Amino acid sequence: MSTQTSEQQQTVTISIADLEAIIQRTVRETVREELRRLLYQHLPAIRHYLLHEGPDDPEGDEELLQEALEILATTPPDAWVSLDDFEAALDRAEAAGEVSR
């Protein structure tokens, strides 16, 4: 690595290997920090999910899947709404005092 300095500008020469190492370290640290932040942000929900997770039951899981697929096959497509539309309708009902969360 070499440097040249002037009053207003500095030029740094760096090898491709050093640049790759800097980028990899930066990405690794950023991803690690983002995963840590997301984990702590969602820790209560993760804990709640894990506490309510039942025993491993492949047969029961398959039965639930088949029931869900049957419902999907018999439900007309126009009966479905997007999650955003559902949440908007829920917000309106809550604001009108029709439901509470």
Image (cartoon, rainbow, N blue to C red):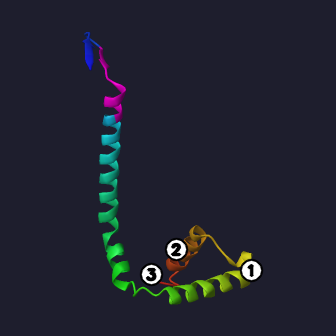
Q: Which residue is mark 1?
A: 76
Residue 6, picture quadrant: top left
Q: Label 3: state its secondary structure.
A: loop
Q: Nearer the viewer, mark 1 or mark 2?
A: 1
Instruction: State which region is magenta.
Output: 9-20
Q: Amino acid at mark 1?
A: Pro
Which labelled disc corresponds to residue 101?
3
Residue 13 placement (x, y as % from top left)? 32, 19
Mark 2 and mark 3 in contact? Answer it, CB < 8 Å.
no
Q: Earlier in the sequence, mark 1 or mark 2?
A: 1
Q: Label 1: state its secondary structure.
A: loop
Which labelled disc corresponds to residue 91?
2
Q: Residue at x 34, y 40 (%)?
A: 24
Q: Amino acid at mark 3?
A: Arg
Give the spatial CA distance, label 1 vs label 2: 25 Å
Q: Circle 3: is it few (<14), some (14-19), or many (20+) Cα within 10 Å?
A: few
Q: Earlier in the sequence, mark 3 or mark 1?
A: 1
Residue 56 placement (x, y as % from top left)? 42, 85
